[in-house]
Image: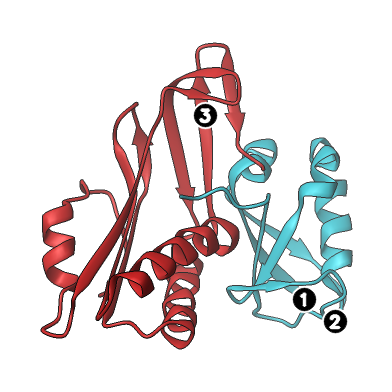
Chain colours: A cyan, B red
Amino acid sequence: MKIQVKLFASHRELAGESEVSIDLADNARIADLIEKLFNKYPDMEKLRDETIVSVNKNFAENDAVLKDGDEVAIFPPVSGG
Amino acid sequence: MTVEITTTDILLDRILEQVRTENTGGIVSFVGTVRKRSRGHIIKELQYEIYEEMAVKEMETLETLSRNKFELENIMIVHRTGTFTVGERVVAIAVAARHRKTAFEACEFIIDELKRSVPIWKKEIAENGEFWVND
């Protein structure tokens, strides 16, 4: 399945794009997506400990299972306000 | 709308009037502004980036959470997106309640939670470089 991943803040800057498409096996987990993303953008490895994920606009854990059509976003810890 | 992401300036009088109900005895507001010094840097600009659809959803969830936790007449949460210079207003929260103690407590709760849970990021454009704020 192809998952569209929105990137924000430092993750967006390191990738040079605000949205990327990642190919994954069915029932892949977020952890698998993160590995593929870091393979595609090796500079992002340094953000590994500051990487937070949302799926369909809800914060999600690395072991969550993805399905086709999910909206995923990847970003650093929030700093609004 | 009681939660808003906007590019336009924060007009506090408008917010106070919008949030007031006939049972309101006190309105407490918080306004976040850009300050000159941050984390050892002299700030030229703050750039805000927002995942808008999720931010609105989280702000609405925060409003519901606040209404469940405190007895409130009304809440308004406004966050701007864009680039701002020292002194500009970036976020405003207004809470209307029958009594002031509740309004004070709820207002503090809301800004604390917003800073923890809403997908918004700020980048300091300082005299000595550009830094995403991650703490």
Going by the numbered disc 2, the residue's amino acid type is Asp
Which residue is tagged 1? A1
Please state the horizontal and vertical placement of residue A45, each as a whole percent of the image.
86, 41
**Residue at (34%, 26%) from the top-left corner?**
B86
- Contact? badges 1 and 3 (CB < 8 Å): no
Q: Is residue B109 or residue A4 the one in the foreground?
A: B109
Which residue is tagged 3? B124
Question: For the residues tagged 1 and 3, is the chain the same?
Answer: no
Which residue is tagged 2? A26
- Contact? badges 2 and 1 (CB < 8 Å): yes
Residue B134's tag is: none
Depth check, mark 1 against mark 3: the one in front is 3
Please state the horizontal and vertical placement of residue B120, each as a whole percent of the image.
51, 53
The image quadrant that residue B104 belongs to is: bottom left
The image quadrant that residue A68 belongs to is: bottom right
Please state the horizontal and vertical placement of residue A76, each as a whole percent of the image.
68, 49
Give the secondary structure at mark 3. strand
> Is residue A62 found left or right of A3 in the rendered image?
right
**Label 1 chain ID:** A
